[in-house]
């Protein structure tokens, strides 16, 4: 297979297991985003792929060849870090050229390749600058150029946009997919930012507690999260998680009967804020709630409400709609479509109806 295949990777330290039975594949030309909270093993996984650490179990294969015990320099892997990790005594040109220099690449070829990747990343005008003379955006592009210049088979990006400003981060989210696919490498992009993962990843692997909890397209991870924890990782404002009671044919949610797939035992209902309709006047089937606050967020606003039994509820509305509510406390009515309700098992947190459940 062309690309990267990880099979049953495990790794532990004195403090305990960091990775346990991690398997995934990344095709050449594909971007896989790995998302997870801090300390869940994302960087350790990258270091194992790069050959900087050995797994306790499992294999790393690149283009169908087992590379588990191969030296880092023989794997054809490029890597860029969130802290840039540039050599301070090298200028930008020499930093980018360092992987080629280590391979004793002829001078003419080296200059040609460095120039080509620098032009593509729009940093050819600062190649003579030392890292201290570069902006964070230029440092980030220099680190990315260094990872790309040797045309690696596998490219590992460890949260490379974390330390750049919001404008550049937005621009790079648009530019990176085109740039990365042009190199036809198997790309793993690690991030804690769900928006970045959804913008860049062809597929997303959610890593929690050293295990892959969900492995799917961005759309499926958001619309059909495997668990409560996955649901909370994706979405801003966060998903509403509300207690529900199982009833014949469905559940009782916020005092309303809602037809749902078969469920039993204690359950939690999930509703995305954008799936709620909020009205200032009473509507059929509407649930009376108290509007506590309206919080503007860019071109939309978040409504903070309390349900019939004091449940905290969030909804999002457009700017013009938010203006109608004002800022004072008032009663409103909330509605939602039953098909937008996600059900989770209260004990395990797994989504009811998910294949893993």
Image: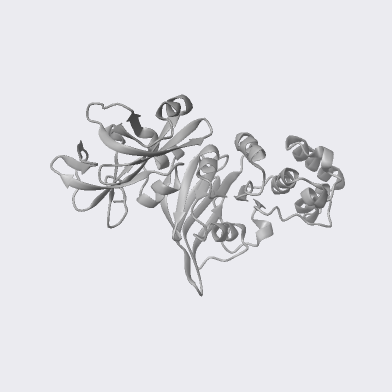
336 or 249: which is nearer to us?
336
Residue 310 picture location, percent across and down: 29, 46
Q: In which quarter of the image is residue 176?
A: top right
333 or 257: which is nearer to us?
333
Q: Can residue 1 be seen in this view?
A: no
Q: In this view, does 9 lie above or below 159?
A: below
Q: Is residue 215 left or right of residue 69?
A: left
Q: In this view, does 231 lie to the left or right of 346?
A: right
Q: In which quarter of the image is residue 261?
A: top left
Q: Which residue lies furthest to the front in this view?
A: 328
Q: Residue furthest bottom?
A: 14
Q: Which residue is drawn at 46% across and 60% down?
A: 210
Residue 216 picture location, percent across and down: 42, 43
Q: Is residue 290 above or below residue 47?
A: above
Q: In this view, does 100 lie above or below 124?
A: below
Q: Which residue is drawn at 51% across and 60% down?
A: 41
**What sort of colour scheme is used for the picture?**
one colour
Residue 241 picture location, percent across and down: 33, 47
53 or 285: which is nearer to us?
285
Q: In this view, does 7 lie to the left or right of 86?
A: left
175 or 279: which is nearer to us?
279
Residue 21 picture location, percent across and down: 43, 60
């Amino acid at each position: 297979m062309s690309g990267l295949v990880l099979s049953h990777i495990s790794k532990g330290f004195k403090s305990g297991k960091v990775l346990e039975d991690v398997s995934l594949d990344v095709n050449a030309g594909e971007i896989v985003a790995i998302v997870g909270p801090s300390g869940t093993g994302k960087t350790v996984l990258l270091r194992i792929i790069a050959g900087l650490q050995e797994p306790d179990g499992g294999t790393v294969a690149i283009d169908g060849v087992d590379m588990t015990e191969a030296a880092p320099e023989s794997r054809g892997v490029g890597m860029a870090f969130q802290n840039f990790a540039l050599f301070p005594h090298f200028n930008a040109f020499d930093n980018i050229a360092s992987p080629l220099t280590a391979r004793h690449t002829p001078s003419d070829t080296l200059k040609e390749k460095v120039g080509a990747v620098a032009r593509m990343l729009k940093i050819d005008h600062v190649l003579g600058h030392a890292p201290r003379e570069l902006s964070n955006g230029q440092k980030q592009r220099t680190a990315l150029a260094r990872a790309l210049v040797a045309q690696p088979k596998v490219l590992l990006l460890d949260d490379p946009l974390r330390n750049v400003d919001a404008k550049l981060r937005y621009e790079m989210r648009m530019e990176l997919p085109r740039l990365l696919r042009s190199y036809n490498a198997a790309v793993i992009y690690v991030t804690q930012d769900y928006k970045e993962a959804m913008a860049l990843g062809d597929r997303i692997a959610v890593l929690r507690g050293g295990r892959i909890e969900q492995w799917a397209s961005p759309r499926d991870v958001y619309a059909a999260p495997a668990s409560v924890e996955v649901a909370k990782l994706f979405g801003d404002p966060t998903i509403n998680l509300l207690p529900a009671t199982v009833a014949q044919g469905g559940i009782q949610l916020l005092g309303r009967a809602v037809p749902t797939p078969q469920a039993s035992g204690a359950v939690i209902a999930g509703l995305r804020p954008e799936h709620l309709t909020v009205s200032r006047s009473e509507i059929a089937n509407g649930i009376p709630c108290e509007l506590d606050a309206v919080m503007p967020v860019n071109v939309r606003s978040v409504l903070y409400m309390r349900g019939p039994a004091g449940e905290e509820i969030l909804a999002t509305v457009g700017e013009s709609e938010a203006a109608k509510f004002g800022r004072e406390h008032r009663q409103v009515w909330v509605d939602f479509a039953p098909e937008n309700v996600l059900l989770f098992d209260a004990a395990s947190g797994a989504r009811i109806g998910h294949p893993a459940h």
